């Protein structure tokens, strides 16, 4: 029985996407690569974050989620995740809007545009369990994709 893992989304099936891996035996995070070349413009007031596609979706248990986190070397290079961390709920997997394709969002705080090449490691995924309170009565069903829980 499958408990958690990664799959390539249909749109990227024939584009040579590598599944994330941990680099060492005791690493918490799975390194994720960019699915295509992207330019992250140098930040100016009003700049929107740049979304970097991964070509991936991830599945996990109903009492789990996964976190998208910056690499430790990211800020040294000038790029910082726009939302600090990304929290992806288990019901995002195979949602009707985008199949569960997750992206990393970055700002570039260097003084020049940053070029991300397909295959560059852009972040990490860490799987976690979560807890609920005794009187939790949540019954909502996800009806969308990226950023849909606040709609």
Image: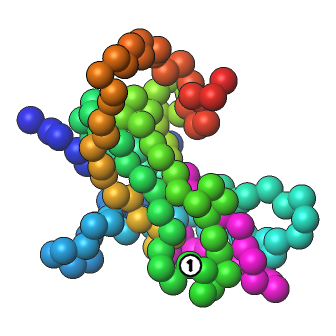
One can see residue 140 in this view: yes
Label 1 element class: helix
- The quadrant the C terminus occupies is top right
At horizontal 30% and vertical 49% (from top left) the residue drawn is: 128
The residue that label 1 is drawn on is 74
Q: Range of the magenta residues?
A: 103-120
Name the one closer to the observer, 51 or 73.
73
Indicate whether residue 21 is drawn in magenta. no
Indicate whether residue 105 is drawn in magenta. yes
> Vertically, is 16 above or below 11?
below
Name the one closer to the observer, 40 or 90.
90
User: Where is residue 56 shown, x and y percent of the image?
Assistant: 42, 50
Identify the image's colour scheme: rainbow, by chain, secondary structure or one colour: rainbow
Q: Residue furthest right?
A: 45
Residue 84: quarter of image:
bottom right
- The quadrant the N terminus occupies is top left
- Report the side of 20 relative to 142 (left or right): left
User: Where is residue 38 shown, x and y percent of the image?
Assistant: 66, 67
Residue 138: quarter of image:
top left
User: Where is residue 124 shown, x and y percent of the image?
Assistant: 41, 65
At horizontal 60% and vertical 87% (from top left) the residue drawn is: 76
> Vertically, is 37 above or below 10?
below
One can see residue 15 in this view: no
- Report the side of 142 relative to 26 (left or right): right
């Amino acid at each position: 029985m499958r408990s958690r893992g990664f799959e390539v989304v249909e749109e990227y099936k024939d584009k040579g996407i590598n599944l994330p891996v941990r680099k060492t035996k005791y690493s918490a995070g799975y390194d994720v690569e960019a699915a295509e070349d992207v330019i992250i413009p140098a930040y100016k007031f009003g700049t929107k974050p740049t979304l970097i596609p991964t070509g991936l979706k991830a599945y996990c248990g109903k009492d789990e989620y996964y976190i998208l986190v910056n690499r430790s070397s990211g800020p040294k290079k000038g790029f910082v995740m726009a939302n600090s961390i990304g929290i992806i709920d288990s019901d995002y997997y195979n949602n009707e809007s985008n199949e569960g394709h997750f992206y990393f969002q970055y700002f570039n705080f260097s003084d020049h545009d940053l070029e991300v090449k397909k295959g560059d490691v852009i972040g990490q995924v860490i799987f976690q369990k979560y807890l609920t309170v005794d009187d939790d009565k949540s019954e909502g069903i996800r009806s969308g994709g990226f950023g849909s829980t606040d709609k």
